[in-house]
Amino acid sequence: MTPASTIIVAREDFSIPGANRDLTEHRDQSRDEKRRFFDLLRESRADVVVLNLTVTEGRGVETIQEVREHSGVPILVVCASADPLTSDYRSAGAADCLHPPVDIRQLNRTIQNVIRPAQPTSEASPRNSEVYRFQGVTYRPDRQSLAGSEGAVVHLTSAENHVLAHLVSHAWVVCSRAQIAESAYGDQSVAKQRSVARVVSRLRDKLEQAGGPGAHKLLKTEPRQGYALVADVVSFPLPQSGEAS
């Protein structure tokens, strides 16, 4: 059975559909809406925030960033399919974007998917039997290597391989240093968390070597939260012996 989840649904201005509003209109209403939202976020210990951006004045990115400054709770965005800021929502920290009409079963599956990666886990990262591709970069965990579209191959250390494997497994999700350290080293100590920061820095350099100028931006730092691979990842089975890789 799917476990129950605590969900907060809000609009771009932090107002919560169905919440009681003061009958008196006043200049600080938007400030009150924001305060009410963050009070609820803190007190309810929400598992996920569903941000309804189907009606927007173009401030959705700022709203996501402000939530991110206060909390690491996963953010799921519902926006128009033609919304030109969809990729910006993800870069700002949204775990996923859905387009209406949203089927309740699809919404539930997506919520569970964005919640699970946010929990510390020691589960295996990408299987060594698969190849992963994102933004023109091919990642082979079995070979501990990255390859660009021009064919240049960049080799990874074991630590770099473990950290990247975790981030690839949780694309678009902000992972804390503790979560990455637990997955990569089986240890959440402060020393290992500091090691994660150094490894991410080296990975940015190697992504740039493989993917070309700007590829380092694929590893996004979320201040006080952690890191995320901001790219759509596609996986393929390893080529059989004799096949081109």
Image: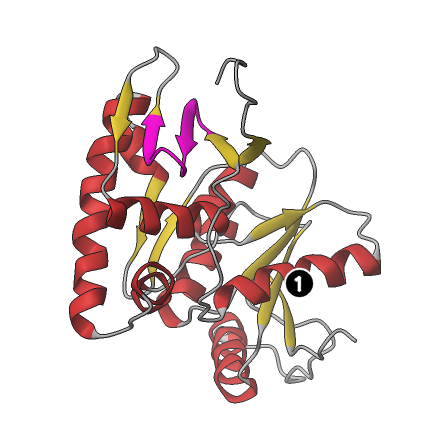
The scheme the figure's colours follow is secondary structure
Q: What residue type is labelled 1?
A: Ile
Q: Nearer the viewer, residue 29 or 240?
A: 240
Marker count (numbered): 1
In the displayed structure image, the side of residue 167 where residue 109 appears, left or right: right
Res 99 visible: yes
Quadrant of the image containing the N terminus = bottom right
| Residue nearer the viewer, 147 or 194 | 147
Residue 170 lies in the magenta-colored region: no
Q: In this view, does 28 lie above or below 168?
A: below
Kindly state the secondary structure of the residue where label 1 is placed. helix
Q: Could you tell whether 1 is left or right of 195 in the image?
A: right
Q: Residue at x 46, y 68 (%)?
A: 121
When asked about the image quadrant of residue 223, the answer is bottom left
User: How far from the left and from the top, in percent, is residue 92?
Assistant: 43, 49
On screen, residue 25 above or below 165: below
Q: Which of 26 and 81 is in front in this view?
A: 81
Q: How crowded is mark 1: few (under 14 residues within 10 Å), some or many (20 or more)?
A: many
Task: Name the residue rendered at 57%, 47% in the picture.
Answer: 57
Q: Where is residue 2 in the image (x, y as percent from the top left)?
A: 75, 73
x then y, percent, for residue 132: 49, 33
Q: In this view, does 196 lie above or below 142?
A: below
Residue identified by numbered label 1: 111
Which residue appears farthest toward the bottom when viewing the image?
A: 43
Quadrant location of residue 115? bottom right
Q: Which residue is drawn at 51% across and 53% down?
A: 94
Residue range highlighted in magenta: 134-146
